[in-house]
Image (spheres, coloured by chain):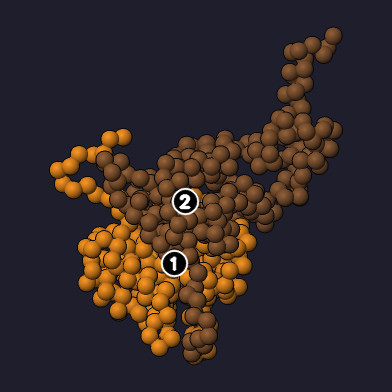
Chain colours: A brown, B orange
Amino acid sequence: LTRQRTGRRVGASGTREAILAAARERFGEVGYDRATIRSIAAAVGVDPALVHHFFGPKDRLFAAAMRLPMVPSDVVDAALTFPGAAAMGAGVKASAGKVGAGTAGAGKAGAGGGMGGEAVASLGDHVVRTVLSVWDVDEVRSAFLGLLRSAVTSDEAAAMLREFATDAILGRIAQVAQAATGDGDGEYRAALAASQMLGLALARYVLRIAPIAQASNEELAAAIGPNLDRYLTGDIRPPTRPPGTSAPPE
Amino acid sequence: LTRQRTGRRVGASGTREAILAAARERFGEVGYDRATIRSIAAAVGVDPALVHHFFGPKDRLFAAAMRLPMVPSDVVDAALTFPGAAAMGAGVKASAGKVGAGTAGAGKAGAGGGMGGEAVASLGDHVVRTVLSVWDVDEVRSAFLGLLRSAVTSDEAAAMLREFATDAILGRIAQVAQAATGDGDGEYRAALAASQMLGLALARYVLRIAPIAQASNEELAAAIGPNLDRYLTGDIRPPTRPPGTSAPPE
């Protein structure tokens, strides 16, 4: 009698909340990587499949547990998906091995007015625009800065955020960079791009350095986008000496 | 009798400490900009000239009051002074107005092996190397991260750090960028470069994102240096439409 439909709905909602509470506790205690969905499910006494059914992959459970107003991987996927993506990927792939050719192409695509007055954004340009438009939303910016604050003040929180970012954000960017360059530097490239976006957030919203705090999203995309393009697809390694030549004198 | 030489030395040392304590209090209370040397001297009951005599300009007093193990403006001056500086400045000036020509030249100077096996570093390359070598020193890195932590957790500390950085760090970088490009974007360029270096510190020392935490200074200079060159001397503005043409359709 108590297990009628409405009763079950309340029960499901209670279970969801219990899972989120357990997840929050577990993520805080052992970090993102070691907090398995299995261990969170066990803490609540439900099947791991139910956790997945309710929340999806672990990064979405984390976002829900941390009460983030959006799922970061959705933002990353949106940032990495843009009209010129296919063209750029092809261009970069075709020129793989040629030093810097990929970036130059991407940069030109971003800077040029394009055909018929419509600018074709480069990948970096699109990433900056997408991320800034998400940070424009008060709750999203607050949640992001809250995570950043906790990471800067606590080693445990920093580890948790690093593990989460590696799984849900950097991995996706690394895949795109890797597909474009094929050089095995995907993770390094993703981390470099992330360092610029982290610094942008710090300068624009925390330190509020005037020229960056006052710049429009458009201006920042033009300034920063090509630099992200270089990190993601350009020549980022120290010059290699031709084989057989000796090291330069110190 | 008590005013013999040794006595005076103790007195001078006491005065120095009193000035530093007053400076610390004043900087914390009203921020960097509004804490004048005059007001700090008044709090201790000494002549402003004595404060200047002991500590030099305000940014050096701030560094001493905050117990920084080095004076940031010294690091910035070292970072901005490098063997290729004169050549780069001339190159950029000669090509001012030509879109991107300055950066391309600087990038090539940095990437090329140079004549006789000696690489000529670009400005950005030199900035990254200098700053990383300073951050390699434990006490310096700790002091820097301490300032960053306080800025991230307190609006007042953020304002103080912003005002200090604008006076002692960004202004110097802006001057160099302005001299090289002559385009009036010096402060914006300096802020962009600072955003990248702030993000690098966050990624390398706070979040410890693996590929950046493990990279050598050499590798990071090669990856990040050319991006700083672009911020400082390259084409960073959105493409301008030729006069008389209409805006592209949205």
Q: Which residue is mark 1?
A: A99
Which three-letter amino acid code belongs to the residue tagged 2? Gly
Label 2, residues with CA under 10 Å away: few <14, some 14-19, many ≥20: many
Between the C-alphas of marks 1 and 2, the distance is: 16 Å
Disc nearer the start of the sequence (1/2): 2
Residue under the point 42% across and 85% down: B118
Task: Spot the residue most to the front.
Answer: A94
Q: Nearer the viewer, residue A218 or B140?
A: A218
Determine whether B57 is above or below B8 in the image.
above
Q: Position of residue B103 (x, y in %)?
A: 33, 66
Q: Is residue B108 left or right of residue A75?
A: left
Where does residue B137 sit, x and y in percent of width and height? 58, 75
Q: Chain of mark 1?
A: A
Query: What is the x, y in percent for residue B178?
Result: 27, 66
Residue B201 appears in the picture as rendered:
yes
Would residue B152 be seen by someone viewing this image from the given angle?
Answer: no
Count numbered badges in the picture. Answer: 2
Image coordinates of residue A59 in percent, x first then y, are: 66, 42
Q: Residue at x 48, y 40 (%)?
A: A134
Report helix, strand or loop for mark 1.
loop
Within the image, what quadrant is residue B187 found in?
bottom left
Question: Label 2's element?
Answer: helix
Quadrant into which the N terminus of chain A falls: top right
Q: Nearer the viewer, residue A44 or B224?
A: B224
- Between A183 and B142, which is closer to the camera in this rendering? A183
Q: Chain of mark 2?
A: A
Q: Which residue, as the protein is rendered here, is positioned at the far top?
A: A1
Amino acid beneath label 1: Val
Task: Using the image, determine if residue B234 lies above or below residue A36.
Answer: below
- For disc 2, the marked residue is A89
A153 or B222, nearer to the observer: B222
| Circle 1 Cα neighbour tier, 10 Å, few/some/many (<14 / 14–19 / ≥20) | few
